[in-house]
Amino acid sequence: MRSWLRFALLTGVLVGCAGGIGMTGTASAQDVRPGGRVIKFDAYRNGSHFGVSTVKIVGSKGAETVEVVTALRVGLGPITVFKYLLRTRIQWREGRIERLESVVNDDGEVFRVDARRTDAGLMVEGVDGKLTVAAEILATTYWQADMLTRHELLSIQHGRVLKVGFETLGEETIVSEGKQSIATHFAMRGDLDLDIWYDTQGEWVKLTFKVDNSDIEYRRVTVGPSDLASFVPLDQVPGVSGSDVQALIDP
């Protein structure tokens, strides 16, 4: 169990954010205050629900504050076999990352990424130490249209630069928030190997990938009032228990 999850999490596949292709959101995304919205995905492994990824986006275009929480748990009843919790906060200014903070509890192993904008670019401190990357780089949160044109992304799991490419595979009918929707299917290949769909309104509605014999799928679902309470403080992530993570998955 841990081997395939670790591979996926190392590359940032399970960490998601939401948004649109040149859009600021649709009416189906729950507003949290003027200019803000919350979007949620349920995560499935071989058809079984095992986690959620919820995203809050607040602010005007190019100056957003984005909050992400991704919670995954595998268990045998009350016994936790594997737990994972990620909390990320990204502040944008003039369409570029101004500050990025990310904390991950990967089954008890804690990772941190901290990035700040400087005159030389975006200075990133992650698992491999410090590096400076292009100020225009996008993170593996998938909420911006420009991601589909980029060849490098910054992993919010470990602070590494990932090399990727995209291919458009055409329109398909998928289910989003319990309703059928027409969406365009894109394939991302390289250091990240996944498939992602955006609907005709430019909203991210689905994501899939395979690890070993496991099929992972993110399904866009309707946001509920309790989901607004899932954004736990970043400093609480290192100490979370399996039951804490389960409470975020099934509030």
Image (tube, helix red, strand yellow):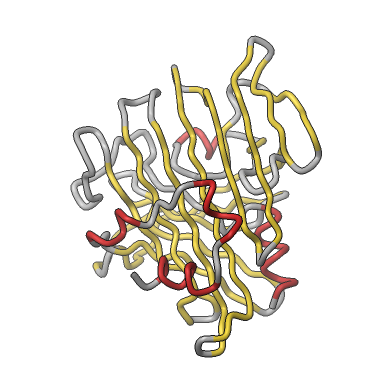
Q: Position of residue 182 (x, y in %)?
A: 31, 58
Q: Judge from the rendering whether residue 220 lies leftward or rightward of residue 213; answer left or right.
A: left
Q: Would you say 78 lies left or right of 174 here?
A: right
Residue 233, image x and y in percent?
Answer: 46, 47
Viewed as shown, does residue 214 lie left or right of 176? right
Residue 251 picture quarter:
bottom left
**Please, is residue 220 above or below residue 1 in the view?**
above
Which image quadrant: the N terminus? bottom right
Q: Residue at x 67, y 68 (%)?
A: 5
Please tell me which residue lies in front, 249 or 235: 235
x and y, in percent, of residue 46 in the image: 54, 81
- Tell me the residue at 69%/30% (across/down): 124
**Who is closer to the viewer here, 149 or 19?**
19
Q: Residue at x 75, y 72 (%)?
A: 3
Q: Residue furthest top?
A: 119
**Is residue 28 found left or right of 15 in the rendered image?**
left
Answer with the quarter of the image where residue 61 lies: top left
Taking the view exactly as shown, the residue that stands out farthest to the right is: 128
Residue 2 at x, y percent in the picture: 71, 73
View extreme (bottom): residue: 77
**Residue at coordinates 54% horizontally, 76% vertically from top-left?**
45
How many marks the image carries: the answer is 0
Say if 62 sits above or below 90 in the image: above
